[in-house]
Image (cartoon, rainbow, N blue to C red):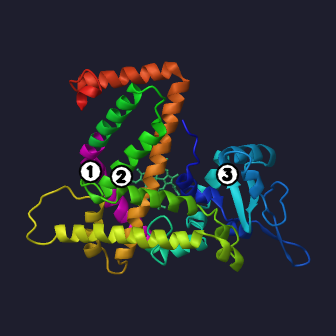
């Protein structure tokens, strides 16, 4: 099973890898001579221009961080290019960031590439902490992620799960190993796309997913312009800005098409009675929500991407990890298999294939 870096998870956890402006402020101690002295967390020795970037080349980032934290403590200061990064890696340090100083760390840092992508419509993930974010988050929790809504997508999940199981069965019938990581990824991506845009399949699905993958490769902030935000040269020599602009243009076109389709479908006279998908909900909310916090169409497109980004890599990585742990632990695997068989029997099926 490929051990890939869960990039979006890193993005979601940005507060734990936060550009430490707040920390620098709260740890400022005035020296007797009146000059500000910063009590910075400890960190390894840094190279002149790149800082600690070279350390990331050694292994997977989370393993590098774990090893460094063993030496430098649960709160350490690294520098990626020009960007200072505080890494909080113990439960107590994470609690300080996520709970005690929650409000100070609530806004995710936005680099030049994210700014180029969002162009002012920051959705939920990157909206600065404040009333607009609170309002959007409230409608998302109540409308998009409510228990009723999650339940309404059950048939989509079951349908996609059947497809996953068929793919696993046909791959297992072949001679080679089964790449469960790739199959799980497709399963999660397809279930999520269908929850967002409806039961129909997205005709540009493959192109869309390819662009998303490219985008999520740049967005976590490891492109040259994000690492050296003050450098005009970095902006000039990097391919990231042109790629971001191209993805933005093409993906917005796809999303414009999806939104238009939904608007046409919702037009009076359309008798089709279907369960609302996420886009239907967002378009309905656009008409309903407090005009003080308007939900613009640009923001709807960003929220569509936020939901996709926040849900796919996280869920796929979790499933992947669970499967890897089960393979390493035959006792737990046997127990899990027994539970699945019991649940199937209770539902009147003798095998998983029998549900298809
Ligand atoms: C196993 C799966 C998942 C994991 C491990 C996970 C993990 C996380 C983490 C660590 C955060 C950051 C929390 C914070 O900053 O306080 C987050 C935020 C978020 N997650 Fe999840 N998540 C998962 C599934 C999902 C799903 C299925 C959805 C949507 C359908 C989703 C939507 C979001 C959104 C919208 C945010 C941003 C909230 C905000 O910034 O206000 N997540 N998630």
Magenta stretch? 133-158
Q: In this view, which residue lies farthest toward the right?
A: 33
Q: Quadrant of the N terminus?
A: top right
Q: Helix, strand, or loop for circle 3?
A: helix
Seen from the viewer's position, the closer of residues 12 and 161 is: 161
- For the residues bearing labels 2 and 1, Cβ distance under 8 angstroms: no
Q: Is residue 3 in sight in this rendering?
A: yes
User: Disc 3 designates what residue?
Assistant: 93
The residue under the point 41% across, 70% down is 250
User: Disc 2 designates what residue?
Assistant: 192
**Circle 2 crowding by C-alpha within 10 Å: few under 14, some 14–19, many from 20:** many
The image position of residue 76, as x and y in percent, is 75, 54
**Circle 3 crowding by C-alpha within 10 Å: few under 14, some 14–19, many from 20:** some
Q: Is mark 2 within 8 Å of ligand 1?
A: yes
Q: Earlier in the sequence, mark 1 or mark 3?
A: 3
Query: What is the chief secondary structure element of the magenta stretch?
Result: helix
User: Disc 1 designates what residue?
Assistant: 148
In this rendering, would 173 be left or right of 104? Answer: left
The residue under the point 23% across, 24% down is 349
Q: Helix, strand, or loop for circle 1?
A: helix
Q: Quadrant of the C terminus?
A: top left
The image position of residue 149, as x and y in percent, is 28, 53
Q: What is the spatial separation of the Cα atoms under label 2 and label 3, in whole angstroms? A: 33 Å
Q: Nearer the viewer, mark 2 or mark 1?
A: 2
Q: Helix, strand, or loop for circle 2?
A: helix
Q: Earlier in the sequence, mark 2 or mark 1?
A: 1
In this rendering, would 199 be left or right of 222? Answer: left
Q: Nearer the viewer, mark 1 or mark 3?
A: 1
Which quadrant of the figure has residue 342?
top left
The residue under the point 81% across, 45% down is 71
Seen from the viewer's position, the closer of residues 288 and 283 is: 283
């Amino acid at each position: 099973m490929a051990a890939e870096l869960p990039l979006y998870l890193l993005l979601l956890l940005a507060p734990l890898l936060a550009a430490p402006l707040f920390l620098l402020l709260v740890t400022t101690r005035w020296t007797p001579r009146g000059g500000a002295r910063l009590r910075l967390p400890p960190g390894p020795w840094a190279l002149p221009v790149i800082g600690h970037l070279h350390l990331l080349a050694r292994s997977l980032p989370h393993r590098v961080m774990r090893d460094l934290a063993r030496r430098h403590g649960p709160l350490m200061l690294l520098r990626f290019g020009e960007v200072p990064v505080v890494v909080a890696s113990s439960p107590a340090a994470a609690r300080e960031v996520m709970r005690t100083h929650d409000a100070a760390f609530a806004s995710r840092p936005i680099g030049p590439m994210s700014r180029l992508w969002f162009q002012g419509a920051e959705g939920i993930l990157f909206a600065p902490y404040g009333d607009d974010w609170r309002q959007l988050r409230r409608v998302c929790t109540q409308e998009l992620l409510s228990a009723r809504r999650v339940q309404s997508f059950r048939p989509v999940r079951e349908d996609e799960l059947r497809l996953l199981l068929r793919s696993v069965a046909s791959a297992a019938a072949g001679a080679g190993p089964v790449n469960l990581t790739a199959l799980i990824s497709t399963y999660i991506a397809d279930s999520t796309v269908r929850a967002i845009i409806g039961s129909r399949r997205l005709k540009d699905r493959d192109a869309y997913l390819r662009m998303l993958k490219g985008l999520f490769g740049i967005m976590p902030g490891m492109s040259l312009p994000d690492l050296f935000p003050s450098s005009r040269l970095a902006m000039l020599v990097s391919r990231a800005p042109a790629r971001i602009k191209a993805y933005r243009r093409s993906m917005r076109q796809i999303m414009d098409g999806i939104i238009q389709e939904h608007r046409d479908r919702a037009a009076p006279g359309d008798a089709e009675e279907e369960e609302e998908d996420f886009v239907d909900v967002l378009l309905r909310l656009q008409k309903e929500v407090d005009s003080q916090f308007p939900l613009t169409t640009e923001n709807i497109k960003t929220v569509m991407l936020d939901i996709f980004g926040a849900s796919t890599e996280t869920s796929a990585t979790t499933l992947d990890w669970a499967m890897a742990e089960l393979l390493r632990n035959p006792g737990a695997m046997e127990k899990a298999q027994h539970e699945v068989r019991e649940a199937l029997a209770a539902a009147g099926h003798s095998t998983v294939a029998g549900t298809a």
